[in-house]
Image: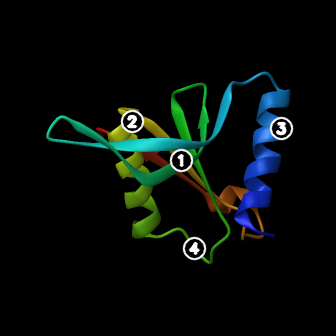
Amino acid sequence: MLETVYKSCLAYRLRKSGLFIEIERPIPVIFEEVRMECGYRADLVAEKSVIVETKSIETIGPVQVAQVLTYLRFLNLRYGLILNFNTVLMKDGIKRVLNGF
C-alpha cells in the first residue's frame, strides 16, 4: 500500500487510543531570524513530542535517518521513529532516531 494509507490508519489508531496526533505538521526553517515555510512536513507528530515518519520502502537507510534528524532539529524535539511497512515483520521496520545523542 501507499505510505499515505499507512499514515492515515496509524493516525486513526493512535487517536482512538487517546493520543494527540498531528498529521502533516509543517516544519518551518529559520534562517537569520526569518521564519520560512519551505515545504517540510512531518508525517505524524504524537503528543507534540515524537515525530513518526511512515515509509513503504525496501530498507531504511541514512537518507531517511537524516530526514527525521533534520525534522527533529527544526522542531526542537528529541525523539523520532521511522516505521517501514514494507517488511515481513513490523519489528524489522522500526528505526528509532534521537536528536542530541
Residue designated by label 3: 13
- In three-dimensional space, the C-alpha distance between marks 1 and 4, rounded to whole angstroms, equals 19 Å
Q: Residue at x 40, y 34 (%)?
A: 78
Image height check: is 16 above or below 56?
above
> Which secondary structure lies at badge 2?
helix
Residue 34 falls in image quadrant: top left
Image height check: is 77 above or below 82?
above
Residue kind at label 3, given as amino acid type: Arg
> Which secondary structure lies at badge 3?
helix
Q: Which mark is residue 94?
A: none
Residue designated by label 4: 59
Do tag 1 and tag 4 residues touch (Cβ < 8 Å)? no
Do tag 1 and tag 2 residues touch (Cβ < 8 Å)? yes
Q: Residues within 10 Å of mark 3 (few under 14, many from 20)?
A: few
> Which secondary structure lies at badge 1?
strand
Query: Counting residues from the N terminus, which is met first, the one under dot 4 or under dot 2?
Result: 4
Label 1 or label 3, whichever lies nearer to me, is: 1
Picture quarter with the C terminus: top left
Residue kind at label 4, given as amino acid type: Thr
Residue designated by label 1: 42
Measured from the top left, where is residue 24 in percent x and y? 60, 46
Image height check: is 46 above or below 37?
above
Residue kind at label 2, given as amino acid type: Leu
